[in-house]
Amino acid sequence: MKNIANTTKTIVVSLAVSILSGCSNSEDTLSPKPIFETEQQSQNELDLFLKKEFVDPFGSIIRYKFDDNLLEADQQGTPVKLENVQPIAELIKKAWITPYNKASNIGESFLKRNFPAEIVIIGSPILNGDGTRTLGVADSGVRVTLVEGNAFSLEPGADNSAWINQAFQTLHHEFAHIVDQNFNFDFQQYIQISNEDYSSPGTWTTVSQESAIMRGMVSPYATSAVGEDFAEMVAELITTPADVFESRYITPEDCTTFSADGLIDCTRRNEGRQRIQEKVTIITEYLRDDVGIDINVLRDEFLRGIE
């Protein structure tokens, strides 16, 4: 789960404004109750579309009808606008399903085996009792919750790029947790790269983007735990053009123009970039060898899909 605080501080990744509490994968066993179990005779055009595109091929339900049972007792949210559901579902096909189908060495079979049983779309952020906002949830590998669906605009000529970047960075982050659950990413080598640099509980919100890079991570949120570091890295690799990722996180700075403290900070940023490169190599090989996913193809198809 990705949570954000109600602050105006913006982190560099396009995912969101400063995020507060950690992302967790519930260990509770979910028992999805598909809407089609109680609406077998529904001829609603939207339901028929969702059944054809998600239920029939993947056994996955798009839940758009608001249900308090989908939230914790101290959480609040609002329903997604009905007219936004199909456009968002079509984006899910273009920016998630098609990219994975083309990037997997087993094609469409990959998502048919690993697609979550439910995708929940909520209109607002999930508002938590402690004042934070939740931007996405992955529950036990069977449910992904996508929020802020009402921020998607259907107005002619509307620029939805910010919403798409935020929503799909969140979505790919959450699906990275599901991939890890299903394919058991070995964190032993990965965690050694930044082992001493993860934030103590509740303190990662004080970490700047610059400090995150020094630690070998792509965002402040990634410093909260090794699992979040992994998911943030996967999401950033998928949603960022290769040249932008390279210049932002990999290419060393020229430190010769700095002096004193500036030189030390520049050197530390470059050391962090070396760590990020090590992590990219580990993730790329894991996805290729253990999962059967070419992350370069996945990125290119995602970027093509959101165009």
Image (spheres, helix red, strand yellow):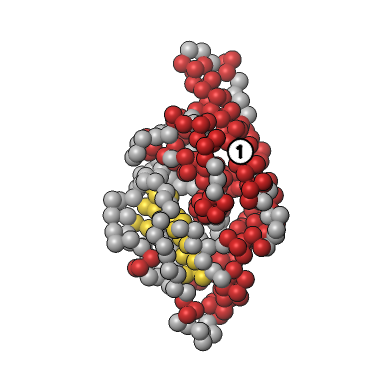
Q: Is residue 79 above or below residue 230?
A: below
Percent from the top left, x then y, of residue 130? 28, 51
Write the residue at 60% across / 63% down. Answer: 113
Q: Is residue 188 visible?
A: yes
197 over 161 or under it: above or below: above
Query: Circle 1: is it few (<14), some (14-19), or many (20+) Cα within 10 Å?
Result: some
**In front: 86, or 218?**
218
Amino acid type, callout 1: Ile
Question: In the visual, does 122 lie left or right of 251?
Answer: left
Q: Is residue 154 visible?
A: no
Residue at point 50%, 28% (across, down)? 214
Q: Quadrant of the C terminus?
A: bottom right
The residue that mark 1 highlights is 282
Instruction: Give the residue drawn at x 52%, y 16%.
Output: 263
Q: Is 195 rendered above or below residue 170?
A: above
Where 204 falls versus 168 (above or below)?
A: above
Helix, strand or loop at label 1? It is helix
Image coords of residue 142 (percent x, y): 49, 62
Q: Is residue 110 left or right of residue 62?
A: right
Q: Quadrant of residue 125?
A: bottom left
- Judged left or right of residue 18, residue 84 is right
Residue 114 coordinates in the image, percent (x, y): 58, 60
Counting from the top left corner in percent of width and height, residue 41 is at: 51, 87
Q: Residue at x 35, y 68 (%)?
A: 69
Between 261 and 58, which is closer to the camera in this rendering?
Answer: 58
